[in-house]
Image (cartoon, grey):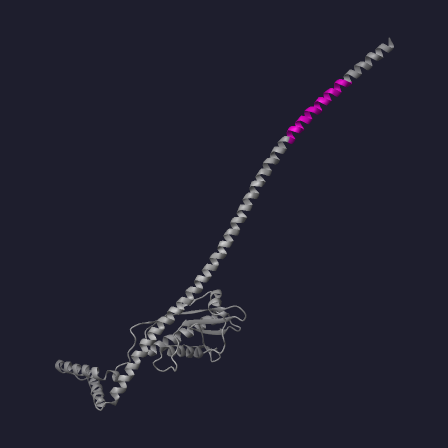
Amino acid sequence: MGLLKDFLRIDADRRSALATVRQEAQSHRLRIDELGAEARRKRDEIGMLEEELRRLAEDVARTEELLLDLEARREAHDRDTHERKVDAVRSGLAHDRADGYRIAEEFRQLRSGFEGERARLLAEADTGRMMDNFFQIEAFLKDTGTPIPDAARKALMKERQDLMARIGPLVAPPPAPDGVFKATVVYSTLEEGEPTAVVAVGLPDEAEPSGPHDLAALLLYGSYASVVEKIGPGVPRPRRADGVVVYEQPAGSRPADEVALDLFLAVEDGLRKAAAAAGVPCELTGVFLEPEIASAVFPRGDARGI
């Protein structure tokens, strides 16, 4: 009996242990299934993230290509803009030079004819008498203290007009061209190497030899005289570059843009005064150029000047 009881007890323990093992195995299977499902879900999420990353990488690549294309277009646009500005400055100065040549030719013809007529009149015998009569009539008409009857005033005005028609070049101011001398005075700085101020204007070439009828020479030397007066005798003489008169002045210890402005104002003032002294209407326009445009249009020149 004792052996049977032990056997039954051992069998019951074995069955209980087996049931426990089976239950634990079932629990592990369920856990394995849960982990497998979690792993598949994670793989799906990773796959979605990888797809999203792939799309983002494609978007980044497209954006980089677009940026490179925009950068290339910007550089091409900058080059085109630079070339257009350079061409505009050169064509503007060339136009001023051509238009100035037309005004200078008209000025020369008018003054030459005027001087020739004056010389002819001075050679005539009765010119002195007519001039005396003219100035006496002028003084009489301007004398406010002596009343003049209307009939006498009309007669004097008629005689004055007749004398003016005969000796006009001797008593009237020299004639001036109908046109207006128009020019653009550009100023800037050259930054390559030593900072230098630069001012340029399109003027026609002076005649060889130049004289009192040479408007280009009057304007050129009038502007240079103004520069010497306002800035000092040490300023370099102007030079010609492709028909354009160019002033250059090293900046030294001063800011180059300030030196350029002072040089521009001196040149502009000299041109205005020279044109006014010649009796030629003058319109000047000042334009500041970017240094890179100025460097392309006005490369550094010979310091000897003209």
Relative placement, left or right, of 57 versus 267 is right
Q: Is residue 12 visible?
A: yes
Quadrant position of the N terminus in the picture = top right
- The residue under the point 48% across, 59% down is 79
| Residue 234 coordinates in the image, percent (x, y) | 49, 79
| Residue 170 coordinates in the image, percent (x, y) | 26, 85
Q: Is residue 152 magenta?
A: no
Q: Quadrant of residue 162?
A: bottom left
Up-down relation of residue 122 to residue 103 (above or below)? below
Q: 255 or 296, which lies in front?
A: 296
Relative placement, left or right, of 261 versus 24 is left
Q: Quadrant of residue 47?
A: top right
Up-down relation of residue 174 to residue 75 (above or below)? below
Up-down relation of residue 128 to residue 283 (above or below)? below
Q: Is residue 27 magenta?
A: yes
| Residue 233 coordinates in the image, percent (x, y) | 47, 80
Q: 210 or 220, which lies in front?
A: 210
- The residue under the point 82% across, 15% down is 10
Q: Quadrant of residue 187?
A: bottom left
Relative placement, left or right, of 250 versus 160 is right
Q: 135 or 217, which lies in front?
A: 217
Q: 63 or 267, which lies in front?
A: 63
**Identity of the residue furthest to the bottom in this view:** 125
| Residue 30 coordinates in the image, percent (x, y) | 68, 24
Query: Start and end of the magenta stretch?
Result: 17-39
- The residue under the point 41% across, 64% down is 88
What is the chief secondary structure element of the magenta stretch?
Answer: helix
